[in-house]
Image (cartoon, grey):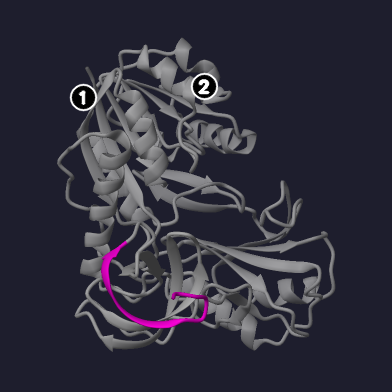
Amino acid sequence: MLTVGSIIEGMAVDLDYQGQGVVKHEGYVIFVPKLIDGEVAEIEITKLKKSFAEGKIKRLITKSPDRVEHEELELGSYDLIHLSQKKQDEWQIKTTYETIKKIAQIDFPIQNIITTNQTTHYRNKSVFHVMNQPYLTLGLYKDNSNELIAVDQFILSDQKTNEVLNFINKNQIKVDSNKLKHIAFRTNSKQEILITLIATQEKFMGRNNIVSKLMTIPKVVGVTVNVKSHPKVIFGEKSKTLFGLNRITETLNGIEVQINDRSFFQVNLPVIQKAYQVIKDNIEPNSSLVDAYSGIGSIGFYLQDKVRKITMIESNRESISMAKNILESHRINHIDIIDDLAEKVIHLLDADYLVVDPPRQGLNEKFIEQVSEKSFKKIFYLSCDVKTLAKNISALQVAYELKEVIPIKMFYQTSEIETLVILEKK
């Protein structure tokens, strides 16, 4: 009889939507992290429910040719690091296809995955946690644990972030770890960096010493302090600049985009630009477009040289302010920005195309109902959650036909799934 603590021998027959190995044993489905389909292992049962269980690998008996050995398996930040690049691509394509087919109840051809094949050092934004140590030490969470592990290098972050991370951990700066909770890094293609100290209050022991040390690092464009407003949310609503500028710039389709420490901006720019180019290739010249959930306007700015008119919809005041600054500095006069919730204004707008890049929870019911009554030639839907994407596709099928599903490999070594979907008006 299976119990918590039982040791069994089993073979993974599949990978689930989180990339975990699926083992079947005595009527149970057992989910085992970091076990690859085809592998046989001794498995310890860690959780038991009525029809399924969770387990962990005690000993691998047979290894998959797709297994990649890494010393850094203990961190929870990269749950697919044990898979080869080929296997990660295959898993994402399969998971995307099966999820949409099951939830939306449709079959469709799935396109080749969008990737730059850069599997490490691709993140331009990273957040590290301050450990409870007398000297400032930055760490990340251990796999399946609330325990922090000190890190001097992080293989997903870019070169500049790793340089500063190593510098901080080696400098033995005395700090109050009860107040300073996280440090965030933003970088750009010039390897400039904006550093944010995230704390429970604006002033804390060690703050001035940290800033004076960071100022000595080449290409540090700014240091800010951000005050947490809630223990479960990393960034608060207000930041104060301590050195330089609370701004880093990135060039997007010839336009200099300004990003501050709290702006939403794509974490892997080279990959997402490939997705933007797919959208650009699928729209006609001199057409009109609505860009909903536009943020600081990165999609619209990438497309602006091909279309006649763009209307951006965004409700975050700070993102709107930054987008307007970009419009003014580049004298772009064929883009309008509406300061409101997309579901409140979409019924007032008509255009040839609609682009949506919603948050993880996807499009709400009201937005979908109103869009279904519109006559957009195509809808381009960028998604960071394939389950909500599938539910939205199912609802949109009343008026729009699914034409293309294109997986986007934004985050190698992780089970994060990004997708571009193209729908056409029926």
The disc labelled 2 sits on which kind of residue? Glu
Quadrant location of residue 267?
A: bottom left
Residue 135 visible = yes
- In magenta stretch: residue 9: yes
Viewer-closest of 281 and 304: 281
Where is the N terminus found, in terms of image quarters? Answer: bottom left
Q: Residue at x 39, y 18 (%)?
A: 371
Image-quadrant location for residue 300: top left
Q: Secondary structure at mark 2?
A: helix
**Mark 2 in CB contact with mark 1 (< 8 angstroms):** no
SS for dot 1: loop
Q: Which residue is mark 2?
A: 343
Q: In this figure, which residue is indicated by the disc labeled 1? A: 284
> Residue visible at 20% across and 37% down?
404
Residue 68 is marked as: none
Q: Is residue 348 left or right of residue 41?
A: right
Label 1 sits on what residue type?
Glu
Instruction: Residue 307: give x, y in percent of width and height.
Output: 30, 25
Camera sees residue 354: no
- At 33% from the left and 60% from the top, the residue drawn is 16
Q: Is residue 20 left or right of residue 216?
A: left
Tally of numbered tags:
2
In the rendering, at what x and y percent does residue 82 appear? Answer: 33, 76
What range is drawn magenta here? 1-15
Alpha carbon distance from label 2 to label 1: 26 Å
Q: Position of residue 177 (x, y in %)?
A: 77, 74
Residue 31 forms part of the magenta stretch: no
Dominant SS of magenta comes to strand
Does 115 appear above or below 83? above
